[in-house]
Image (cartoon, rainbow, N blue to C red):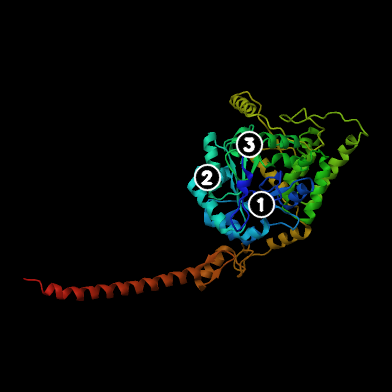
Amino acid sequence: MVNEDDAAAQSPGKPKGYNFYRSCLGSPRYVVAPMVDQSELAWRMLCRRYGAELCYSPMYHANLFATDPKYRKDALQTCPEDRPLIIQFCGNDAQQILDAALLAQDHCDAVDINLGCPQAIAKRGHYGSFLQDEWELLTEIVSTLHAQLAIPVTCKIRIFEDLEKTIRYAKMLEAAGCQLLTVHGRTREQKGPLTGVADWNYIKSVRQHVKIPMLANGNILGLEDVHRCLAETGVDGVMSAEGNLHNPAIFQGVSPPVWQMAHEYLELVQLYPCPSSFIRGHLFKLFHHIMNIRQNSELRQYLATANQLVQFQNVVQQVREKYEPFHKGHVPYEPEQVAAGSEEDLPLSPWLCQPYIRASPESHRQKIAEKVREAEDPNRAKRQYFDKDGKEISRKRMKKLRRRQRRPNKTDAQIQHRHERRLEYCSECANPQGSKCEFQLCRVCCKDRCYNNDRDCPGHGILIKSRRAKAKLFEDGQAVQDEHDVSRNSDDDLTIAPADAREPL
């Protein structure tokens, strides 16, 4: 086991290891994971209300955070009560991550490096778990942040299939300066339908070989799983992601009605606003079991297209009005029909917060094989799609109509403004004018005007004057260079001539 006294021994300066874990973080055991678009300030504050002792921010892109003020302003939302807090970054360049961390360090207790994201976007961006084989780069990133930041650096990783390699990986990060390590007990390939079960034995083995504080992640469906994980692995705390999204009161071991959690969350959203997509995602997680009931299909569709706070509040109210009489026992509840492929035997009533149990990878593979067989069957029934008038449409058209339904509803003033804009035409022809054109022309006429009068039009992106000026500078520079080359060649001829003259005939 870890010798905590040795691990707590500190050099002068910022707190490290267990000193950091205890004095700065307060020895947290219940931790809310970093979740993209889901662990925003309003959700963190709800989780803290129900027992969370440490929260992580969503994953932020280090390069955007460091270079884009608007992205940084939108992302960096916190308040005095939102502590302890660890801000997580993704990236693959030590200097970029350092630049972002320096801008964030005054607003959090530590900076975390995301080395665990397994998604395709992480593969394209070359970050997350797709850096786990580049140990020299990771050593540079962690050591740079450890040396330059005023606060500690932490890491969140996934395991390798090879246990010994996983242990060496964790020890390498510790040696580079990582002060707290979170280990997700799944490999990079275990994601989506192939998630499967996290291996706590790997987490236990890593715990026995590192001296810094450690958190475990994976297989946390309720408070009993938290305590069992602490006992079996010996870690200092447990992090919850999906379990927390389905039940923000998971760390209190209670299962409140979903409308209660949703109502409290929406109240916090009014205090700490966030994009409607975040809100929609949270409500779908909270109402997961209810929305899988066939009788609630219209309500599910309404939630899918909702984009205003009052609409989300309306959904919560409808759920409450339907299921609160059952919850209070005023009306006996008869099980409702669930959609195909959904859980039929829930441990609790569908209106109570409870975990979502994923199908096993083997079950998923069987479903895929069945779909392949159906697709190859020439007698299969073709799926049809219809618009609101009952006319058959293509699948592509159907998806386009659904996207339109999710767009914000236009006000009368916006519709009137759009109509008025359609009446504005080019002053030289019958085409509509560009909305941002300072000459009030269409693009074709504007291009002719700029070409003939040596002008720019930023509204149309036409930069005739700028490009001519740039070309003139290039020509002038080229002419100076040519003169310099001629002068240098003449000087060379003069210096060589006397030497040639002394050569014998």
Residue under numbered circle 2: 172
Three-letter amino acid code at disc 1? Ile
Q: Is any part of residue 105 visible from this angle? A: yes
Q: Name the residue at 89% across, 34% down.
A: 326
Disc 1: CA contacts within 10 A as few (<14), some (14-19) or many (>=20): many
The mark that comes first in sequence, 2 or 1, is: 1
Whole-percent x, y for residue 189 in the image: 57, 36
Q: Residues at badges 2 and 3 in contact (C-beta under 8 Å)?
A: no
- Which mark is on residue 192? 3
Towards the viewer: 412 or 351: 351
Q: Residues at badges 1 and 3 in contact (C-beta under 8 Å)?
A: no
- Nearer the viewer's eye, disc 1 or disc 3? 1
C-alpha span from label 2 to label 1: 21 Å
Disc 2: CA contacts within 10 A as few (<14), some (14-19) or many (>=20): some
Three-letter amino acid code at disc 3? Gly
Query: Helix, strand, or loop for circle 2?
Result: helix
The answer to whether residue 57 is above or below residue 209 is below
Three-letter amino acid code at disc 2? Met
Q: Residue furthest front?
A: 5
Q: Residues at badges 2 and 1 in contact (C-beta under 8 Å)?
A: no
- Nearer the viewer's eye, disc 2 or disc 1? 2
- Which mark is on residue 305? none
Whole-percent x, y for residue 214 in the image: 63, 43
Query: Helix, strand, or loop for circle 3?
Result: helix
Residue under numbered circle 1: 86
Towards the viewer: 49 or 278: 49
